[in-house]
Image (spheres, helix red, strand yellow):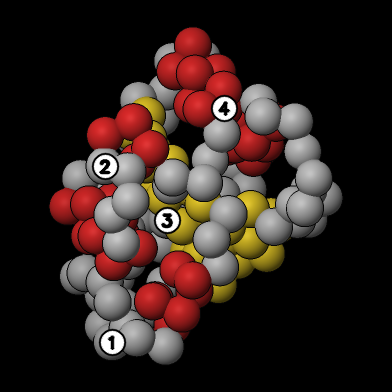
Amino acid sequence: MKPRLLLNENMPIPAARRLRAAGWEVLHIAERYASVTDEAVMALACAEARWLITFDRDYGELVFQRHLPPPPLILLLRVPSYEPEEPARWMVELYASGALLEGHFCVFDGETLRHRPLANRPGRAH
């Protein structure tokens, strides 16, 4: 079963549409909760057990420096230039490859994927 996704406001709408068309359950912040804080986005992802997909580096600070409870997975996309549907393709390909590890902060640069454990996940030791 595919994980439920929460796309941050900075994700292109065409990527959300493509993921939905491929059978993913997607909540896009721009469609329902535009302009909410990063903390609110992360709290929503946690409350609904959704994987958070974003281009915003601030989530690393929220998790690793401020120690806010993270969602099951955060995927930070650090790709400077892309077509509006490409983030959906990356997500599908990374998921299909088994490269995305729940309980991790993942960073994808368009070619490589790095992982860092989310040590302060709810239910895990701090």
Q: Give me the C-alpha separation between circle 3 and circle 1.
A: 17 Å
**Which label belongs to residue 126?**
1
For mark 1, does the 10 Å Cα neighbourhood hold few (<14), some (14 to 19), or many (20 or more) residues? few
Task: Give the CA distance from mark 2 to mark 3.
Answer: 20 Å
Which of 40 and 75 lies nearest the eye of the viewer?
40
At label 1, the amino acid type is His
Classify mark 1: helix, strand or loop.
loop
Q: Earlier in the sequence, mark 4 or mark 3?
A: 4
* Percent position of residue 113, x then y: 71, 57
Q: Residues within 10 Å of mark 2 (few under 14, many from 20)?
A: some
Percent x, y for residue 44?
22, 52
User: Residue at left 39%, top 76%?
Assistant: 63
Q: Which residue is mark 4?
A: 15
Left or right: 7, with 68 as reference point: right
Counting the numbered discs, the total is 4
Asked whether residue 46 is in view, the answer is no
Looking at the picture, tell me which residue is in the foreground, 63 or 79: 79
Q: Quadrant of the C terminus?
A: bottom left
Mark 2 sits on what residue? 33
Sequence-earlier tag: 2 or 3: 2
The earlier-in-sequence mark between 3 and 1 is 3
